[in-house]
């Protein structure tokens, strides 16, 4: 069957049709993503009101394009899946209300999807991964390590206690006068810099607590940047390179802890996998660090294509398919109210007989 997915939780307006073919093989029939980067660039970050209005203006056209691209119209769709949280409420309302109206008028079931579940299940769409596996989600709004045990069965092992990693990249870029979005520009500058010039902190490194922290690192970058005036291109490049090295190192430490824990909890899985998702996963140094770690710990490193790592609607349609297939759709979906906060582990089925 075929599911139409709709995603409007942040600054991407997206729609996609994903089919489940005979034998359970998925196929992405269309995947349209309109990024609002240019609308927000002048403000150095996502402005919620601008985002909501841009979704209103773009969504109908994006859905039409996704349907046209897939070679079907609404009558050929078996269900509609829309992101219902977490995210910016204005955008969520636009996407979920549109999905409700379409579901109602076409008489199709609606599936309310948790955006993070979309990220968590993408590796099954792209690589057919079997449960359980580990997910590292590193985006502008999230920095988490999640144990993916099954559809609707997630356990968060680590999260950031302050900034998200993408946010740290974006703020670093802003402090150094680099354009928005920061991540790619910090990476480009870093490639010309000397990573040994600044000894930035590696927050949480070696600590027992599994979580992430990036605000101390951000403060250290600010300090370095204000001590030098004016900042030359070389200074900026050196700060970026030193920042990126500190981030890779800190991230590697946190992830290696999780890989060990996974090994301890699932000693019988011969070839476990670590999946990365989120915009920061595009960073080559971070990717290389994670890939090396996986090699060291005997993990398969799974990095879905960039377009499916950042926000998109194919992952939402796919999560809808997974939920339908598992018989886990919510009959009350038409009454679902968008949630700005909606932790992934809160939708997990209760684990019977487990102390955790
Ligand atoms: P979320 O998915 O958490 O709601 P989001 O829309 O910000 O938030 P994404 O679109 O997945 O998430 O990712 C955007 C983030 O990724 C931005 O913070 C951006 O700076 C960062 N990013 C993109 N490319 C790179 C890169 N090459 N290196 C580091 N960070 C990057
Ligand atoms: Mg985004
Ligand atoms: Fe996302």
Image (cartoon, rainbow, N blue to C red):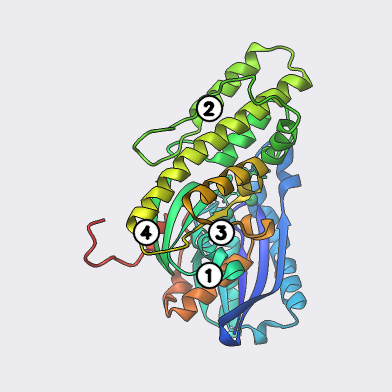
Q: Quadrant of residue 285?
A: top right
Q: CA distance from mark 1 to mark 2?
A: 35 Å
Count neighbours of disc 2 (C-alpha within 10 A) and say few if under 14, some if 14 to 19, many if 20 or more: some
Look at the numbered disc 2 and give the secondary structure of its residue.
helix
Above or below — where is 334 with respect to 276? below
Residue 212 at what x, y percent from top left?
45, 38
Q: Position of residue 218 (x, y in %)?
A: 55, 27
Mark 2 or 3 closer to N-term? 3
| Image location of residue 162, percent across then percent down | 46, 36
Label 1 sits on a secondary structure element that is: helix
Q: Earlier in the sequence, mark 1 or mark 2?
A: 2
The residue under label 4 is 346
- Horizontal side of residue 234 vs 335, given as left or right: right
Q: Are marks 2 and 3 in contact (CB under 8 Å)?
A: no
Q: Where is mark 2, residue-wise?
A: 217
Disc on the earlier residue, 3 or 4: 3
Which residue, given by chain and number where applicable, does mark 3 sit on? 92
Question: Which of the labelled discs sits on residue 306, or is there none?
Answer: none
Indicate whether 41 appears above or below 272: above
Give me the C-alpha separation between circle 3 and circle 4.
19 Å
- Tell me whether the residue at label 4 lies in contact with that at label 1, contact meaning CB atoms closer than 8 angstroms: no
Cα distance, mark 2 to mark 4? 30 Å
Q: Earlier in the sequence, mark 1 or mark 3?
A: 3
Q: CA distance from mark 4 to mark 1?
A: 16 Å
Looking at the rendered structure, the secondary structure element under dot 4 is helix
């Amino acid at each position: 069957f075929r599911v139409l997915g709709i995603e409007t939780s942040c600054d991407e307006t997206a729609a996609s049709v994903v089919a489940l073919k005979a034998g359970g093989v998925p196929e992405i029939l269309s995947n349209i993503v309109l990024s609002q980067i240019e609308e927000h660039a002048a403000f150095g970050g996502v402005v919620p009101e601008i985002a909501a209005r841009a979704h209103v203006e773009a969504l109908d056209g994006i859905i039409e394009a996704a349907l046209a691209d897939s070679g079907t119209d609404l009558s050929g769709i078996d269900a509609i899946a829309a992101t219902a949280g977490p995210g910016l409420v204005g955008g969520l309302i636009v996407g979920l209300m549109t999905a409700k109206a379409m579901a109602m008028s076409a008489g199709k079931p609606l599936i309310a999807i948790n955006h993070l579940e979309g990220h968590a299940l993408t590796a099954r769409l792209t690589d057919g991964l079997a449960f359980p596996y580990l997910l590292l989600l590193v985006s502008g709004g999230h920095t988490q390590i999640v144990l993916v045990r099954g559809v609707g069965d997630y356990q968060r092992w680590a999260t950031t206690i302050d900034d998200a990693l993408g946010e740290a990249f974006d703020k670093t870029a802003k402090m150094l006068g680099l354009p928005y979005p920061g991540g790619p520009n910090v990476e480009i500058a870093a490639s010309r810099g000397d990573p040994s010039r600044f000894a930035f902190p590696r927050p949480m490194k070696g600590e027992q607590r599994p979580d992430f922290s990036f605000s101390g690192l951000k403060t250290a970058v600010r300090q370095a940047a204000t001590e030098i005036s004016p900042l030359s291109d070389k200074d900026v490049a050196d700060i970026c390179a030193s920042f990126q090295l500190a981030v890779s190192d800190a991230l590697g430490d946190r992830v290696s802890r999780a890989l060990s824990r996974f090994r301890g909890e699932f000693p019988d899985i011969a070839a476990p996998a670590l999946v990365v998702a989120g915009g920061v996963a595009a960073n080559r140094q971070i990717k290389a660090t994670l890939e090396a770690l996986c090699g060291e710990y005997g993990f398969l490193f799974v990095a879905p294509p960039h377009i499916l790592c950042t926000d998109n609607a194919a992952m939402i349609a796919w999560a809808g398919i997974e939920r339908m297939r598992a018989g886990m759709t919510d009959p009350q979906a038409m009454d679902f109210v968008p949630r700005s906060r909606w932790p992934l582990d809160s939708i997990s089925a209760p684990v019977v007989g487990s102390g955790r």
